[in-house]
Structures are given as structure tokens and as C-alpha cells.
Image (cartoon, rainbow, N blue to C red):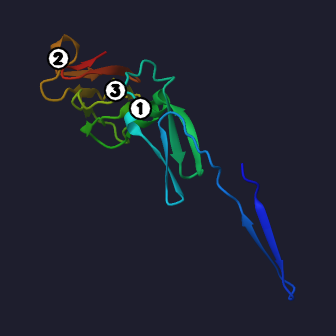
Amino acid sequence: MTIPVLKIKALQRPLLKGKMDVRFPANVAVDQFLTVLKANGTYTFGVDYTLIGEAPILDPTTAMVVIWDETADTYKLQSLSSLLESATQIEQHITEAGPVDVLPNAGIVRVDQTVGAAMTLNMPLSTVKTCPVLLSDWKGDAGTNNITVNAAGSETFPGGVTSFKIDGDTASRFLRPIPGVGYAW
């Protein structure tokens, strides 16, 4: 490795100028899928995506992803499962009168209407539903004001039915999408 050279020039004025000649190491090496190119004295670092193999993810809790957090100005290492979980499951809080479409990424639907009235929930096609969903009578009046849940298109629920009711106070129903078929509970 080259030893840095420091040149100092003393001038007659109360000023000191310095110049440092630091050389980039003569040997630059990278591992795995990283690349380095030198052209006209400029080093360019990159990624060779052709060296990244395709393979199924067997355990999303051990598959890691690096995320740039712009707010914190840092990189963070997250498991694929935590990334998918946080991105796909939101809470849908329903306070207005129905009917209401259940969102494809809703993991919990809280029916909490400000008025006492029956409610209709329309499920999305199971092919676009990104996660299971818990439908909950949060207000606690489904015994009086039933919550009717409708399947989309020709899809069905267990027993081949296209709709069902949540008809008990504070009752809930957990639904899992079966793409192209409907929902199971």
C-alpha cells in the first residue's frame, strides 16, 4: 500500500496551504454479486444481478431484506415475513352506514357504526385478497342489527352459500381466502 504524501507550503502571509496525495489501493476486490470496474482512473461499483439465483423461499422468517428508512436516514434489516405482514394487513374501521366493500388488504374489519342499523359487507374476489380477515361486531349490536356478508361474483362460503349473517352481539367470523373459490372459516 502506498504511503500518503503530505506537501506543505509556507507563505509569507499568515497562511498555510497543504496538499495531500492519497492513492486509492492498487487492489480492489468484491465478493458475491458485487462488481467493480475501473475506467480512466474512476472506479464504479455495482451489482451483477445475473449472479443472483432464483430459489423458492422456504421460510419467510429467515429470508432477509434490506430496507432504506428515509425518515431515520438508515438502512434496516427485516425478515420477509415481517415486511409482508406489515404491508398486507391493515385494520378497516367502519363507522358509516353500509354497504361497505372489505378492502383486499384488510386483516381486521371492525364494524362500529355510529347509527344503529343493519350492515352489509361485500367481500373482494378471493384472488385479490392478500390475507385472511377477521370480521368483528365492534359496536356490539349485531344481535339486533345483523351484519350480512356477501361473496363476490360466483364465489361461495362453506356449504355453497353466497352470503351469511353475523347475528350475535360482539360476534366475529374469521375468513381465509381460497383463490378462485371463495372463503373458508
**Distance of label 2 from label 1 (alpha carbons):** 47 Å
Q: Position of residue 31 (x, y in %)?
A: 54, 35
Task: Name the element at disc 3.
Answer: loop
State whether residue 89 appears in this view: no
Residue position marked by numbered label 2 in the rendering = 161
Q: Name which of mark 2 and mark 1 comes first in the sequence.
A: 1
Residue position marked by numbered label 1 in the rendering = 52
**Residue type at mark 3?**
Ala
Q: Position of residue 100 (x, y in %)?
A: 26, 38
Classed neighbour count for the residue bearing mark 3: other residues with Cα under 10 Å, few (<14), some (14–19), many (≥20): many
Residue at screen point 46% across, 27% down: 81
Give the number of the disc on residue 29: none
Q: Name which of mark 3 and mark 2 comes first in the sequence.
A: 3
Q: Position of residue 122 (x, y in %)?
A: 23, 33
Residue position marked by numbered label 3 in the rendering = 142
The foreground one among 140 and 109 is 109
Circles 2 and 1: CB atoms closer than 8 Å: no
Task: Name the element at disc 2.
Answer: loop
Quadrant where the C terminus sits is top left
**Residue type at mark 1?**
Ile
State whether residue 156 appears in this view: yes
Residue at screen point 41% across, 24% down: 170
Q: Position of residue 157 (x, y in %)?
A: 22, 17
**Distance of label 1 from label 3 (alpha carbons):** 53 Å
Q: Is residue 8 left or right of residue 142?
A: right
Q: Name which of mark 1 and mark 3 comes first in the sequence.
A: 1
User: Splitting the image into 4 quarters, where does residue 173 fall?
Assistant: top left
